[in-house]
Amino acid sequence: MKKILILLFLTAFISHFTSQIVASDLKVILDKPNSKVRYNFLFSGTYYRVETTLYKNSISPSNRIAYGIQEDESEYADIVYPPGYVYNDFMTQTNDWAYQPATQYILTINAYEKSGGPVANIYTKTLTYVPPIETPNLTVTSVQVYSSSSGVKIFDSNTSSNGGPQLQKNASYQFKVTVTKTGNAAVNNLRFDLCQFNILQGDYPTVPPKAIKTQYINFTQAQNSALVTTETTIADFGSNSFMGIAFHLDKDNTIAETNENDNIKLLGAGYHGKMANIGDNIEVSVYDINGNLLKTLKTTSDDTDFMNVKSQLGSGKYILRSNEKSRQVLIK
């Protein structure tokens, strides 16, 4: 009995690691609009069960983006795949990560063949697919502004319903800007300019900037976004009014893109002289929409968009007032 078990084990072991599968020409199609990862390859042979697992970049459980089985579930009868057969499969995939750029895709194939005994022959094969390099497109998708002195976030383009931030001349601010890349091409030395201009004279680049802060960033092939952090002092544009900030990508046009017309993102900002010492504590009165005082909260003078105050309130409509300004806000 022991000899039979050992023989069966050896048979299964040898069969599983003997690659006799005829398969080639893997293709991967990322059908994000329909939430499908599709793949196909040339395949031939006679098997009653075929398992396929698709990975991106490298083989590991966390990199699996598709899995499929083809078999006769009722009789486990053989399925004949003739020469030249195109094996198609797909998996519904709702994880956005699956559709982000990859350097390669790897498909593992396990094919089960009846052996006439209690243990099936299992053949394995691995195919790879390197996607063609795609021309990228680069855009600024979000902007956050922080006071350099206190670290308070005063503006977030993802959540703000008030247009732009309120800034003080001669004060220093930190800008955290998300730059997004489409396609799987690597991008090196992407020029990023933060430009300040007088918005009352028109839009950038028609109006020349008064102050420019420049730096360079890189993207790997598989990377589709980068956070750019830059710090600058607000220039003096004269009387209190409005100013403009432009985030300009690839100003020298050294990188080929699918769209060369969306490399500038404009942001308008309220512009004021120094109204209090930067970082001074101030009180903000919180009223309901009918003017009833609800509470008084503290923040700092550079929290010009009341971001710190709004973070302490629940959903609803409010009127926020300090000694320097008043603002109606909607918090969802």
Image (tube, helix red, strand yellow):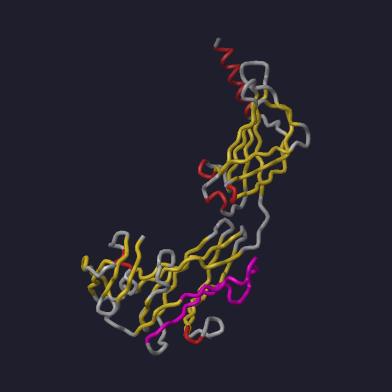
Q: Is residue 320 above or below residue 101?
A: below
Q: Give the image location of residue 218, x and y in percent.
A: 55, 65
Q: Give the image location of residue 123, x and y in percent.
A: 66, 29
Q: Is residue 189 above or below residue 276?
A: above
Residue at image coords 65%, 24%: 121
Tell me: 290 left or right of 220: left
Residue at image coords 31%, 63%: 311
Tell me: 282 left or right of 60: left
Q: Residue furthest bottom?
A: 238
Between 245 and 327, the one nearer to me in the picture: 327
Name the quadrant containing residue 82. Answer: top right
Quadrant where the N terminus sits is top right
Name the quadrant containing residue 132. Answer: bottom right
Q: Residue furthest right?
A: 83
Residue at image coords 37%, 77%: 166
Tell me: 80 left or right of 61: right
Q: Residue furthest top?
A: 1
Q: Is residue 314 above or below residue 280?
A: above
- In the image, which residues are magenta? 240-267
Q: Give the image location of residue 306, x and y in percent.
A: 31, 70
244 part of magenta stretch: yes
280 part of magenta stretch: no
Residue at image coords 64%, 20%: 75
Quadrant where the C terminus sits is bottom left
Name the quadrant containing residue 88. Answer: top right
| Total marks placed | 0
Q: Give the image location of residue 154, x and y in percent.
A: 36, 70
